[in-house]
Amino acid sequence: MQLQSSASSFNSSIPSFSSIFFSVRKKPAFSFMSRAKPRLVDLVCSMSETGAKTKETKLWGGRFEESVTEIVEKFTESISFDKQLYKHDILGSKAHASMLAEQGLISESDRDSILQGLDEIERNIEAGQFIWRTDREDVHMNIEAALTDMIGEPAKKLHTARSRNDQVLTDFRLWCRDAIVMILTSIKHLQVALVTLALKNNGLIVPGYTHLQRAQPVLLQHLLLAYVEQLERDAGRLLDCRDRLNFCPLGACALAGTGLPIDRFRTSKALGFTAPMRNSIDAVSDRDFVLEFLSANSIIAVHLSRLGEEWVLWASEEFGFITPSDSVSTGSSIMPQKKNPDPMELVRGKSARVIGDLVTLLTLCKGLPLAYNRDLQEDKEPMFDSVKTIVGMLEVSAEFAKNITFNRERIQKALPAGHLDATTLADYLVKKGMPFRTSHDIVGRSVALCVSKSCQLQDLTLDEMRTLSPVFDEDVYEFIGVENAIKKFSSYGSTGSTCVADQLNYWVTKLEINK
Ligand code: ARG
């Protein structure tokens, strides 16, 4: 499991889902098997594993005479979730240690011990051999304390000119940077699946809806490509977010910077950031990048939820436009006949959590004075949840797209209903020189006539049409009927077959799809 959480990953390599979401075996908060009654302290907090035999002094424990109570320790810990940042924490520490040595703040041999020790810790974590300790509070102190256990004195120099306040943000920005690359990859998977689905269904006309009422005929390809466009804007938002978050807080220390001769440009560059953050107070206070990332994810979630809704409707008996294969459907425990499009229902459902994650962060931040406040520790779980959920939603939507069939016959049969060609007929009269408002009215009357006769526009005789306007001529029949109507669309971006073919070519080239 290699996570390329490094300077190079910013430009090219793609971190894997599992490496971002490093999962650690959790002991349940309490077990019915082992204990009749759960202890309050176990219920208060999610993680009771410490691995510690004896109580040790906290890294910050100098001025304290008493140790914190178990309830406080378990309530304030973040190790149960921020251990996911371990790779980025180690990366940041390595850059920091190298800079300290270059600046003469630690010796080269201390630096080498630190770097080697950190490498070994990383290997231990990845081998599942590292013991995460709740009494060591968070990922930063777990790693630093483990390093001290391992290499002794040199490890005590690592936190020179650094605070956990700038450290956690360095880790988190690096993590978000990698997570964005991962989401971009999943966005592309879905775009490719949608374009491939479009290619498979060349020429298929479906009813286009407004107000969920039949409106005009459209090519299915056109409709599918509308989702591809949304996803492209989603990717753009993430790229913007990545550019804005790629500034380095390391060296801002607690909030005020330091009097020690550090080189923040050196660490920033080593970690692949654009530049160090200009203002140390801003550096440790800012969570805009989290809000922005969660907002971008929320918009993706809304797009996918709409796609989910569309496909759930299309899979219904009432629409019957698509048949999802069994491999992406689930059944009912009571109704033997049921075959449900659950994955897309859950895509719609999970959008709620992604939006909730954003609202959590907005609420978290709104009352906070500068600079760091412990409340901010609550920024991580919503972010982890949001990224994990979005990737899942994108990947399952792509899976669904690969496993649906459009029911051509059923769609074809349903097309005549709803007078989808009425607007094209109005355009016909405009082409003959009639003002649009007048043509709208005449076609409205034509439709009313069809409704009274239970027929389609193309079933009206020329004489019947001429009772409504003398402008109608033989060539009107080239404009009515869904097949004819669709041929008449020619404006840029419209549903005409040439326009749609142009769009399709654009995406096939851009997404490098082999036809
Ligand atoms: N676990 C903390 C967080 O996630 C790290 C920073 C703690 N800083 C402090 N001064 N207590 O925000």
Image (cartoon, rainbow, N blue to C red):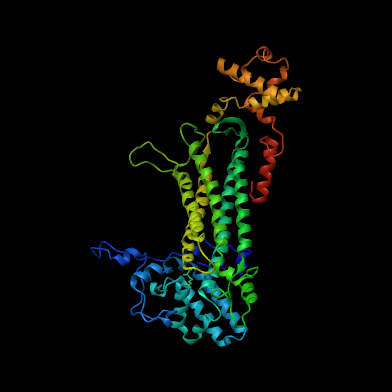
Q: Is residue 316 visible?
A: yes
Query: Which of the 4 image quarters holds residue 448?
Result: top right
Where is residue 353? Give x, y as percent: 46, 52
Closest to the observer: 372 or 84? 372
Query: Which of the 4 image quarters holds residue 456?
Result: top right
- Residue at image point 51% right, 53% down: 390
Where is residue 132? Give x, y as percent: 41, 72
In this rendering, the answer to whether 284 lies above or below 350 is below
Q: Is residue 392 visible?
A: no
In this rendering, the answer to whether 85 lies above or below 201 is below
Where is residue 331? Give x, y as percent: 39, 42
Count of labels in the image: 0
In this rendering, the answer to whether 75 lies above or below 363 is below
- Residue at image point 57% right, 51% down: 189
On the picture, is 53 further left or further right than 278? Answer: left
Closest to the observer: 112 or 304? 304
Closest to the observer: 145 or 330? 145
Closest to the observer: 5 or 54? 54
On the picture, is 502 further left or further right than 398? Answer: right
